[in-house]
Image (cartoon, rainbow, N blue to C red):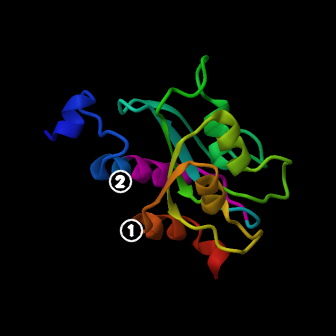
Amino acid sequence: MSEARAAAGGRPLPGTPEGDRHWLGRAVELGRRCPPSVTAFAVGALVVAADGTPVAEGYSRAEEPADHAEEVALRRLPPGGLPAGATVYSSLEPCSARASRPRTCTELLLAAGVRRVVFAWREPALFVDCDGAERLAAAGVEVLELAELADGVRAVNDHLLR
């Protein structure tokens, strides 16, 4: 067992290459739960505490048709809110523009105090122009793109890309 896993009771730690790939892979899998839509991406997201404990998760359209994955995960945080040092993993770059609700995922993440975001695929300009990664970074959030996991996100959204 690696030191990163041993320190987290067997769970991969955020902020390590192994941990970031593991947790982002979980976000990609959550995206597969999304009800189908021809007007929105299928996205999964989860919040993981610094010690490797998953705290909350969500996916697009989980509770309402306009739900975004990050929004659902943040809404599902336990009492006390975001744990210090938590990382948000999202299969798709957090939105910076949206037609369905007044607040974007980028704004929601910043308002919640998120300091680290890891995602797999930059949002294509099919519905809106997105620069969530740049906006988060400009606000001092550590942003990591793991493009090697993007194929799984593209696959679940293939119907939108044809």
As rendered, which of 37 and 99 lies closer to the eye? 99
Q: How far apart are marks 1 and 2 (CA)?
A: 9 Å
Classify mark 2: helix, strand or loop: helix
How many residues crowd mark 1 within 10 Å: few (<14), some (14–19), many (20+)? few
As rendered, which of 37 and 54 lies closer to the eye? 54
Identify residue for label 2: 21
Q: Which amino acid does label 2 sit on?
A: Arg
Q: What residue is shown at x 28% (from left), y 30% (from top)?
A: 8
Q: Could you say where residue 81 lies in the image, as x and y percent from the top left?
A: 60, 24
25 magenta-colored: yes
Pointer 1 with pointer 2, Cβ within 8 A:
yes
Q: In this view, does 5 lie to the left or right of 13?
A: left
Q: What residue is shown at x 57% (from left), y 28% (from top)?
A: 82
Q: Could you say where residue 145 lies in the image, as x and y percent from the top left?
A: 47, 62
158 magenta-colored: no
Image quadrant occupied by the C terminus: bottom right
Q: Could you say where residue 131 lies in the image, as x and y percent from the top left?
A: 67, 65
How many residues crowd mark 2 within 10 Å: few (<14), some (14–19), many (20+)? many
Dominant secondary structure (helix, strand or loop) of the stretch shown in magenta:
helix
Tell me which corner region of the image, top left, top right, bottom left or bottom right, holds residue 129: bottom right
The segment highlighted magenta reads 23-37
Q: Could you say where residue 125 lies in the image, as x and y percent from the top left?
A: 71, 74
Q: What residue is shown at x 58% (from left), y 55% (from top)?
A: 137
Q: What residue is shown at x 37% (from left), y 42% (from top)?
A: 14
Q: Which mark is residue 148?
A: 1
Classify mark 1: helix, strand or loop: helix
Residue 39 versus residue 62 in the image, above or below: below
Q: What residue type is labelled 1?
A: Glu
Q: Can residue 62 be seen in this view?
A: no
As rendered, which of 5 and 159 lies closer to the eye? 5
Q: Residue 82 carries which label?
A: none
